Image: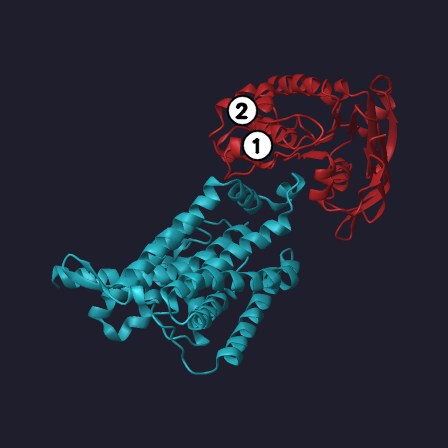
């Protein structure tokens, strides 16, 4: 098991957001965390990344406890984070933000390989982060995280706000990543592309685990879908 | 005014401008990346000047001693303020801005007393290095060679910082951390150490500014407070955090003062404030700043 999240409770200030979320992810798997807006998907991912530290519980990455460590230590341990709001650096060029994120790790990602996956970025190298479109920013933010050669990739609602054609291209790119043996965790509000790509799904609501199983089982379960997912 | 008078006044304004720039550049850098107002900046400049005074004296006022002082004294002062950053300032970055203001103001007061205790009340002047004890001829006019050197150093340091920020991998990390420190951390970069390094670089610029001023000005503990005010004015005129803005603002302040003195000598001290007031009325976000929309 590459990641084992056990009974984490996370707060923003005094408001209690996660009430004992647990996730088990095996090496090389692609899993998705599904739930409506406000279900706790982003907080779960931020908790794993150490950006919002859970008060109690345990998060083990490759058998080692990472709860309580700082985000940069967790990143160096091999977890990559692609935020929902992309967070490209406005004052760095596309190329610079890829370079700044480069570190040795699990894969062999470098500029050439990222440009191989996202050929369009190659033409935008000299553009600043705030001069490119939303879809381009999404490619950049994924490429940037890949430059850090993570073993586990956390993608928070990557399809959010993208045109259908762009989402399709993104799904294709994520399929290519899956061939690289990277473990991927995707989050999504409904039954979009994340479910199609995953071999395991977790449904959460109001900061609690509601269900987990294979995507096929989820698609059959009308009750579950209508109760917890945005359709 | 004749052409030669004009040139002399211009050069004297440029010298003042470079001193202002060296005082303000570190503050600008720290403000731009760390987003904090470092009130201790003037104190760093002052300690840089005093420390250089001591070293220049120690080396017997020789040319060689002067160059050695420029290399050593600012680094020592920088090291001291890096320790201050790690133990005193760092913990307040995520707190409301008033914590940093009070903390750095406290550090300024400590440097003030430290200077009084170590160097006393009497105004000190470091000896001018022998190689600079001659005038520099420009279009048949004679101008102190040291001032020319100071102007050169001001531009040199401007390009040096510009190069670090825009052309090195270290600069890329600095800009990323300035844009979004949380995302930078999530990419595996140790942001607190980046901040210490930027704080250190900002301190070094102020300290070398002090070191360069040591042979040409009377040193007193008050110069730190004075420098702090100048730095603040320059940064406000420039637009918060803009380095080219700081250079231009320093130039404007230096020249307005140099020429203003000819017209209205009794207003000499007020010219910088006048420039600031005009800029704040016409362009409240500063020459190179961006308008901030408060939501």
Give the quarter of the image for residue A216.
top right
Residue labelled with disc 2: A121
Q: Residues within 10 Å of mark 1 (few under 14, many from 20)?
A: many
Task: Name the side, left or right, on which B233 lies relative to A133.
Answer: left
Farthest residue to the left: give it.
B2
Q: Nearer the viewer, residue B233 or B107?
A: B107
Picture coordinates of residue A173 (x, y %)? 65, 19
Mark 2 or mark 1: which is in front?
Answer: 1
Picture coordinates of residue B75 (x, y %)? 51, 60
Could you tell me if the residues under marks 2 and 1 are in contact, i.e. CB atoms within 8 Å? Answer: yes
Q: How many marks?
A: 2
Picture coordinates of residue B125 (x, y %)? 38, 75
Q: Residues within 10 Å of mark 2 (few under 14, many from 20)?
A: many
- At a point 63% along the width and 41% down the height, the residue shown is B183
Q: Nearer the viewer, residue B216 or B95?
A: B216
User: The chain drawn red is chain what?
Assistant: A
In the image, residue B193 sits, relative to residue A119, either above or below, namely below
- At a point 76% along the width and 18% down the height, the residue shown is A196
Quadrant occupied by the N terminus of chain A = top right
Rendered image: mark on residue A82: none
> Which element carries disc 1, helix, strand or loop?
helix
Give the quarter of the image for residue A143.
top right
- Colour of chain B, in one word, is cyan
Residue labelled with disc 1: A98
In the image, residue B276 sits, relative to residue A189, either above or below, namely below
Is any atom of residue B38 visible in this view?
A: no
């Amino acid at each position: 098991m590459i990641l084992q999240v056990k009974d984490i409770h996370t707060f923003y200030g005094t408001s209690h957001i996660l009430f004992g979320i647990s996730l088990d992810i095996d090496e090389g798997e692609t899993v998705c965390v599904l739930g409506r807006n406000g279900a706790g998907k982003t907080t779960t991912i931020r908790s794993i990344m150490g950006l919002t530290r859970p008060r109690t519980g345990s998060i083990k990455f490759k058998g080692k406890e990472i709860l309580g460590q700082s985000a940069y230590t967790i990143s160096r341990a091999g977890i990559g984070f692609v935020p929902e709001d992309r967070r490209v650096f406005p004052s760095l060029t596309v190329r610079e933000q890829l370079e700044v994120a480069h570190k040795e790790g699990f894969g062999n990602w470098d500029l050439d390989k990222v440009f191989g996956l996202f050929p369009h970025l190659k033409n935008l190298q000299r553009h600043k982060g705030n001069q490119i479109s939303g879809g381009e920013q999404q490619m950049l933010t994924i490429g940037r995280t890949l430059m850090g050669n993570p073993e586990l990739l956390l993608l928070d609602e990557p399809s959010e706000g993208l045109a259908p054609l762009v989402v399709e291209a993104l799904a294709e790119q994520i399929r290519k990543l899956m061939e690289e043996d990277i473990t991927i965790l995707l989050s999504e509000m409904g039954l979009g592309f994340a479910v199609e790509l995953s071999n395991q799904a977790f449904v959460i609501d109001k900061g609690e685990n509601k269900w987990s199983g294979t995507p096929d089982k989820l698609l059959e379960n009308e009750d579950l879908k209508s109760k917890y997912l945005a359709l | 005014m004749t052409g030669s008078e004009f040139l002399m006044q211009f050069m004297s304004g440029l010298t003042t401008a470079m001193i202002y720039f060296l005082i303000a550049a570190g503050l600008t850098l720290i403000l731009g990346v760390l987003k904090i107002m470092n009130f201790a900046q003037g104190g760093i400049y002052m300690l840089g000047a005093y420390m250089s005074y001591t070293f220049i004296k120690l080396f017997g006022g020789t040319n060689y001693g002067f160059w050695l002082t420029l290399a050593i004294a600012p680094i020592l002062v920088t090291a001291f303020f890096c320790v201050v950053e790690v133990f005193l300032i760092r913990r307040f970055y995520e707190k409301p801005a008033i914590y940093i203001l009070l903390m750095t103001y406290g550090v300024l007061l400590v440097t003030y007393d430290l200077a009084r205790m170590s160097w006393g009340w009497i105004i000190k002047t470091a000896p001018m290095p022998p190689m600079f004890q001659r005038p520099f001829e420009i279009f048949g006019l004679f101008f102190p060679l040291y001032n020319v050197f100071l102007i050169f150093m001001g531009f040199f340091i401007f390009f040096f910082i510009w190069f670090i920020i825009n052309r090195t991998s270290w600069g890329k990390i600095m800009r990323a951390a300035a844009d979004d420190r949380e995302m930078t951390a999530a990419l595996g970069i140790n942001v607190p150490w980046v901040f210490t390094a930027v704080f250190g670089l900002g301190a070094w610029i102020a300290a070398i500014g002090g070191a360069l001023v040591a042979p040409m000005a009377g040193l007193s503990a008050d110069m730190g407070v004075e420098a702090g005010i100048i730095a603040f004015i320059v940064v406000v005129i420039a637009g918060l955090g803009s380095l080219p803005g700081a250079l231009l603002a320093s130039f404007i302040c230096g020249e307005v003062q140099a020429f203003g003195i000819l017209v209205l000598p009794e207003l000499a001290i007020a010219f910088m404030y006048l420039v600031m007031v005009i800029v704040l009325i016409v362009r409240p976000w500063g020459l190179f700043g961006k308008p901030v929309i408060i939501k």
